[in-house]
Amino acid sequence: MMAVFKDIQVLLTSSMEAVQNLTVGALEAFLPIYVISLAGLSSFHAGVIWGIQLVALILLRPLMGRLSDTRGRKPLITAGMLLCASSFILYPMTQHFLALCFLTIIFGIGEAMVTSSTAAMVAEQSKARGYGTSMGVFGSLWDIGHASGPIAAGLLLGKLSYILSFSIISAILILATILFQIFVRETRGRHGPQTR
């Protein structure tokens, strides 16, 4: 078990999912409040906006998983994190319903890219150490990130504006992506298994 906790590759890859889930938790808690109170839209609009994200995630995860099988995990994780960060930072600058829907689709695409690739990459990194422990660590970091989102956003929003709060959280995603690029290596062939 300690081998997994000492493995920077597994921990950093798992942390990408955790950090991405920071934004998911923050959006789940505060996007409806923003949409209703500041953007002046209805609870129906808030429900539709978040529903679009879930539909995008459901539809795109298999496609993004297939893409990560053929093109590699690391490029998809990196692109997905940048999509999540760039769309997340734009939410508090947007009040139009259709624009918010568009941002949510972009965020859903980014989330699908990250979530479909991180678990597979952790499994590939952990072959010699046991899948169960590695995936347990992965799942725990996922939950920590998700639970931290509302807390972190709440603390920031208690002192700062939506724009500054969301900018700080987006900066965390970008910093994590830079660390991931520097320290994590792809553990498989660039194009993955050959298909017939």
Image: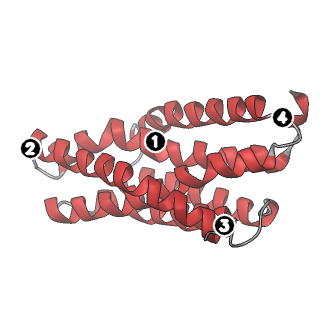
Under circle 1, the secondary element is: helix
From the viewer's side, name the closer residue of 68 and 153. Answer: 68
Determine contact: label 2, label 4, CB under 8 Å: no
Under circle 4, the secondary element is: helix
Q: Please identify, in this view, whether the residue under mark 2 or under mark 3 is nearer the observer.
A: 3
Q: Residue at x 59, y 63 (%)?
A: 68
Q: Quadrant of the C terminus?
A: bottom right
Which is more N-terminal, label 3 or label 2? Answer: 2
- Residue hosting label 3: 72
Under circle 3, the secondary element is: loop
Question: Callout 3 environment at 10 Å: few (<14), some (14 to 19), or many (20+)?
Answer: many
**Disc assigned to residue 12:** none
- Residue hosting label 1: 156
Q: Please identify, in this view, whether the residue under mark 1 or under mark 3 is nearer the observer.
A: 3
Question: Callout 1 environment at 10 Å: few (<14), some (14 to 19), or many (20+)?
Answer: some
- Residue hosting label 4: 5
Q: Quadrant of the N terminus?
A: top right
Which is more N-terminal, label 4 or label 2? Answer: 4
- Residue hosting label 2: 42
* Residue 187 pos. (x, y %): 80, 60
